[in-house]
Amino acid sequence: MGNIPLWLCIPFAGLLLCIAIFPLVKGEWWDKNKGWAVLIWSLLFMIPFAVKYGAGETAETVLECIVNDYLSFIVLLFGLFCVSGNINLEGDFVGSPRMNTGLLAIGTLLSSCIGTTGASMLLVRPMIQMNSWRRNKSHIMVFFIFLISNMGGCLTPIGDPPLLMGFMRGVPFTWSLRLFPVLIFNMVILLTVFYFIDRRAYRRDIALGMRPDISRPTTTLKVNGLHNIIFMIMIVAGVVLSGVLPGMKAFQNADGSVISVPIFRSVRLAVPTLIEIVIILVAAFLSFKTTKSEVRTKNHFTWGAIEEVAVLFIGIFITMQPALMILKSKGAELGLTKPLEMFWATGALSSFLDNTPTYLVFLTTAGTLGATSGIATTVGTVAVKMLMAISCGAVFMGANTYIGNAPNFMVKSISDENGIKMPSFFGYMLCSLKFLIPVFIIDTLVFFL
């Protein structure tokens, strides 16, 4: 298609501005009309694109994005949302600074076992319930997004999709465990900061006369719908299979390409992806069939959060295509040859674009730099520190904005539904500038120079 003009990125920027501004100035209107905004900005991308490149090319581009990116993204989110909504943790745990800090620490490490989305959906409601008695609590969910929804996913390919893509391209499954020192370093800093912020907010709440219900022993913990852990494991297995099956000969054509279902022109749905989708949907269906509705009632379960994410992100996925095309065509020309450059470039773009293709662009770029030692991948040998920088940039900096990583917006929506006044789009970015960017600067000095 040649060089993609930069002006085709305007609809993407316009949609992001709508997501950032309208909830502040026209909240009720936005709640009712966000679907129309998504449709209009998507058409404002597709129509000029069709005029320049043809209707067939446009249909192919949009379908490629929906079939091979958005579909698996939203099905995974839907499955985890359903299954986690059928697990209810009941206990007399009080949302104190120590308890909140401990749950954040546990959740951050859990993210690498069941994915950032899985851990977020599993723990977001217990965190909200623990702190339901408090007034000053939005900072709790902001740090929840920082740690559980993002940073915690850096240790395994299960943790975050970019690392899964790296695994599919030859990065060893256990390689990302090397990022453990970076994760622990960041956890210590952020959890310490969080503890003192939460302690101050906790004392303000107590001073306002707020008291938790501590009439029963604080050691009680009851898990309703515990059998849904089986369905959670099913979903994680489906994600892992989608990364493993393409490398098996049984799922390859004679020319080595993955067996797939033709959709339109070159757009094809890979059979391993189809298997993943079926497994996730079956898990979600069985979860609802085998769990009493009382569990969902206790969780204040509604479909609002997943509906909002589904609507907004299909627009984001479609309108960001020109930006991704430009990045793919120009990535090797950016002159990024040092780990610190890769860390910040990958991270900055992952804050607003899908971090998976961003990771792949810079992994491919790093593979062309001619490293003589490091990690051998299908895109070339990548120096260890360079791969660490790309991986951390993609995973960590997805926390910089609500749209940087899939669970961010979901956690925000569920928090809003439960009466927690979350920061606006720009307000959240201010939080990330205040708390995350200093940590990333320290990371650069300690790990990526």
Image (spheres, helix red, strand yellow):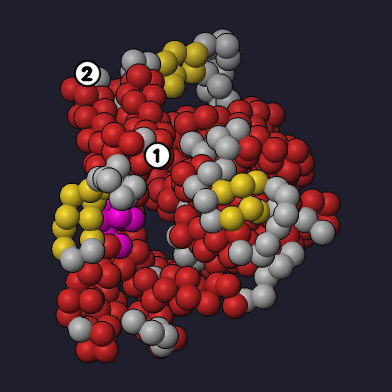
Q: Nearer the viewer, mark 2 or mark 1?
A: 1
The kind of residue on which mark 2 rests is Thr
Residue 52 appears in the picture as rendered: yes
First along the sequence among labels 2 and 1:
1
Marks 2,1: beta carbons within 8 A:
no
Residue at 40% x, 48% y is: 410
Q: Residues within 10 Å of mark 2 (few under 14, many from 20)?
A: few
Q: Residue furthest front?
A: 254
Quick check: 65 above or below 135? below
- Horizontal arrangement in the rendering, residue 172 relative to residue 344 (left or right): left
The kind of residue on which mark 1 rests is Gly
Question: In this view of the protein, which residue sits in the foreground, 67 or 11?
Answer: 67
- For the stretch drawn in magenta, the main secondary structure is helix
- Viewport quadrant of the N terminus: bottom left
Image coords of residue 126 (percent x, y): 47, 30
The image quadrant of residue 364 is bottom right
Image coords of residue 360 (percent x, y): 51, 58
* Magenta stretch in the rendered image: 65-71
Q: Is 96 covered by the magenta stretch?
A: no
Question: In this view of the protein, which residue sits in the foreground, 88 or 157?
Answer: 157
Residue at 54% x, 14% y is: 215
Quick check: 385 above or below 244? below
Q: Secondary structure at mark 1?
A: helix
The image quadrant of residue 343 is bottom right
Image coords of residue 327 (percent x, y): 49, 73
Q: Which mark is residue 290?
A: 2
Q: Is 69 covered by the magenta stretch?
A: yes
Q: Residues within 10 Å of mark 1 (few under 14, many from 20)?
A: some
Image coords of residue 60 (percent x, y): 22, 69
Q: Which residue is mark 1?
A: 247
Residue at 22% x, 30% y is: 282
Residue at 46% x, 44% y is: 168
